[in-house]
Image (cartoon, helix red, strand yellow):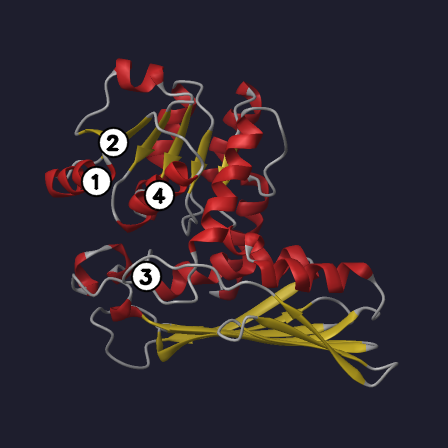
């Protein structure tokens, strides 16, 4: 299979590693920046280009879009214009997606929006517990996802890449990234309300904290997302009628309290390996599994677990949180 990767920044390089780990060798990387092209060519030994001509596009069997979010839709139009199935990184921009979804359906071209955390072993365990029904319905949950934005790319200033811009700000981007797995586990809320704003200087004039309340009709959830946490955190407390789930992403275990037996059940999982320079909890495995799922869907061996239609619904939630 020939795969074209559009964008060779941090995520583009990660997707090169994913493809290599899956045995894909026919990779072409596109980026306008010569320094990124040179780095990828030297480090991963793949062909790189600084422009997209018909030969490059026509020879691709599939595309991976790893550009900044404000360029996703432009790249999706390119993919659809050439009838190429495309995987696209987590997005934060709703405008224009509905028209692209309609076009993709009309052309019967696969568009696979990223849903990385659905491939995390802990999230899979949590979904299995909730969907299994043994512990009754979810009554409420509290979830906190916090990181420190300057830690994302220590080699460059926050204001110098997309997370330092208002619309594509790091904290705002994480809202749909987290909601994509949460709605898969607990469903879409009937209504949401949010508070958000800037609480400290993270190197750019962006909102750095969101606090969200969700009403599911008979159950409730709260979610705090921030990019001011000096220790990277993902932490969940989820209550059910006959049990409770506790999870911290740095402990490599999902803890389940079984009220009937008054005992704890522990779902351990391998922590996996993280790439150099990344938080040890950001393991490569879930990204690899995600790309494997996309390639399987392209080859007709399976179905990718996310769609543009669902992505649009998640981004509509973001707009509701912001009162738009």
Residue 87 placement, left or right of 170: right
| Residue 86 placement (x, y as % from top left) | 44, 31
Of callouts 4 and 2, the N-terminal one: 4
Depth check, mark 3 against mark 2: the one in front is 2
- Disc 2 is placed on an element classified as loop
Residue located at (37% from left, 20% from top): 60
| Residue 190 visible in the displayed image | no
Of callouts 3 and 2, the N-terminal one: 2
Of callouts 3 and 4, the N-terminal one: 4
Q: Residue furthest right?
A: 260
Q: Assign the N terminus to one quadrant of the image.
A: top left
Residue located at (51% from left, 38% from top): 292
Residue underneath mark 4 = 17
Q: Are marks 1 and 2 in contact (CB under 8 Å)?
A: yes
Q: Are marks 4 and 1 in contact (CB under 8 Å)?
A: no
Residue underneath mark 2 = 46
Image height of 292 relative to 143, above or below: above
Q: Are marks 1 and 3 in contact (CB under 8 Å)?
A: no
């Amino acid at each position: 299979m020939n795969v074209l990767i559009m964008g060779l920044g941090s995520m583009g390089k990660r997707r090169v590693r994913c493809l290599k780990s899956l045995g894909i060798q026919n990779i072409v990387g596109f980026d306008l920046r010569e320094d990124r092209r040179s780095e990828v060519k030297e480090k991963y030994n793949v062909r790189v280009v600084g422009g997209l001509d018909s030969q490059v596009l026509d020879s691709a069997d599939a595309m991976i879009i790893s550009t900044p979010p404000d360029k996703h839709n432009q790249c999706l139009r390119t993919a659809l214009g050439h009838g190429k199935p495309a995987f696209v990184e987590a997005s934060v921009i709703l405008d224009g997606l509905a028209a692209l979804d309609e076009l993709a359906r009309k052309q019967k071209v696969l568009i696979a929006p990223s849903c990385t955390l659905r491939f995390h072993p802990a999230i899979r365990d949590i979904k299995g517990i909730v969907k299994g029904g043994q512990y009754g319905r979810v009554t409420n949950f509290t979830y906190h996802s916090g990181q420190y934005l300057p830690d994302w790319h220590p080699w460059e200033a926050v204001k110098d890449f997309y997370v330092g811009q208002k619309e594509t700000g790091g904290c705002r981007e994480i809202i749909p990234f987290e909601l994509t797995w949460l709605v898969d586990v607990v469903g879409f809320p009937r209504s949401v309300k949010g508070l958000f704003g800037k609480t400290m200087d993270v190197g750019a004039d962006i909102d750095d904290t969101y606090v969200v309340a969700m009403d599911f009709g008979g159950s409730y959830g709260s979610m705090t997302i921030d990019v001011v946490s000096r220790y990277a955190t993902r932490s969940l407390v989820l209550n059910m009628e006959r049990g409770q789930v506790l999870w911290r992403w740095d402990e490599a275990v999902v803890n389940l309290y079984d009220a009937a037996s008054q005992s704890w059940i522990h779902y351990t999982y391998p922590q996996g390996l993280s790439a150099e320079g990344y938080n040890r909890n950001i393991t490569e495995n879930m990204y690899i599994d995600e790309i494997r799922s996309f390639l399987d869907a392209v080859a007709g061996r399976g179905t990718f677990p996310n769609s543009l239609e669902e992505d649009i619904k998640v981004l509509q939630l973001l707009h509701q949180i912001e009162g738009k």
